[in-house]
Amino acid sequence: ARQLLLLGSSMLSLFTASLSFQLPSLSYQYQSQASTSVIRCSATVSATIPPVVSATIPPVEMADAAHPLIQRANEILYSESGFYSPYNESAFSEDFVFRGPYIGPLNKQDYLSTMDTFKIHEAIPDISPNAFGFSIDPKDPNRVWFMVRNSGTATGELGLDRDGKLRVPGKGAVLDGCPETFSIIFDADRKVKYLSVGYVADRFEGNTNGKGAAVGIFHVIGLPFPSPGPLLKFAQWLRPQGGGPRG
């Protein structure tokens, strides 16, 4: 047995053996050196690391304050809407539609009738939308988006019926509204074809309990308003129009 071991050692001193193989991501090579009779192992990384791809960041697009539809939207909001001021009936198209999270859809007649009933601008003589962030919808060039944050002091009375018999005093309540999203769609004659209001962006701001538009004002004054659901729909259906319930 000792002779066999000596023979094997002698054979190792006469040659160098190497073995290599390739894996998908790493290359290994083993080599024995006769001079030291020590087996060494080396590994070479040959994996290809993909290059880092930078994200494409589009430029920030800013609305042109001088855009005619933005200018018109601002005019209607402050001086013709019926909410912040008396309305201009001719500013609304005959196929006008109003929508809000609580009230709507309303056609032109119903909308103007509702404005005549509430008379928000009389209940809060100094009401202001404090509008900001006007922009043109990139998918609809006739639509203007913007934000409002209503403010004012309720020194007048809020109307609840067309006859003016049911009035709720504001009692000096201070309105500090939460930010709301509004939009106006214009027709070819630059009349208001569609108006959406009262969609709250941050319900934790202000003192309207997270509610927008007239419903937020009702809350500040202390007037409860039904939550969306069957009761609200029934109340809207009962609202008098031309001497009788809506049908």
Image (cartoon, grey):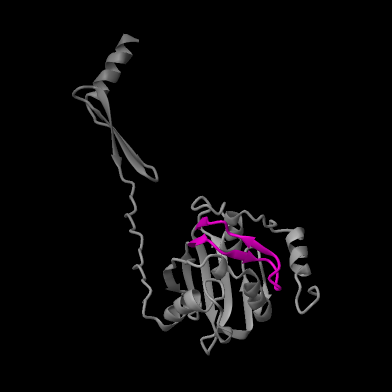
Q: Foreground: 84 or 124?
A: 124
Q: As drawn, is 221 to the left or to the right of 31?
A: right
Up-down relation of residue 193 to residue 183 (above or below): below
Q: Give how far across and how far down residue 124 sits, in percent.
A: 53, 65
**Residue furthest top as drawn:** 2
Q: In the image shown, does 128 or 71 lie closer to the viewer?
A: 128
State which quarter of the image contains the N terminus.
Answer: top left
Asked if 155 appears above or below 68 in the picture, the reply is above
The residue at 22%/24% (across/down) is 13
Residue situated furthest left in the rendering: 35
Which region is colored magenta? 150-177
- Quadrant the C terminus occupies: bottom right
The relative height of residue 166 versus residue 16 in the rendered view (above or below) is below
Q: At x 67% / y 76%, what residue is drawn? A: 113
> In front: 91, or 87?
87
Where 198 sits versus 23, above or below? Answer: below
Q: Quadrant of residue 101?
A: bottom right
Can you give x and y, in whole percent of width and height, for residue 106 in the image?
Answer: 67, 74
Which residue is pictured at 78% across the width and 74% down the height?
246
Q: Number of labelled discs? A: 0
Specify whether residue 22 is painted magenta: no
> Which quadrant would residue 159 be assigned to in this image?
bottom right
Q: Nearer the viewer, residue 173 or 190?
A: 173
Q: Residue at x 30, y 12 (%)?
A: 3
Which quadrant of the view contains residue 29?
top left
- Spot occupied by residue 146 in the image (x, y as percentages of width and height): 47, 69
Single out the residue that lies furthest toward the bottom.
189
Spot occupied by residue 126 in the image (x, y as percentages of width and height): 47, 66
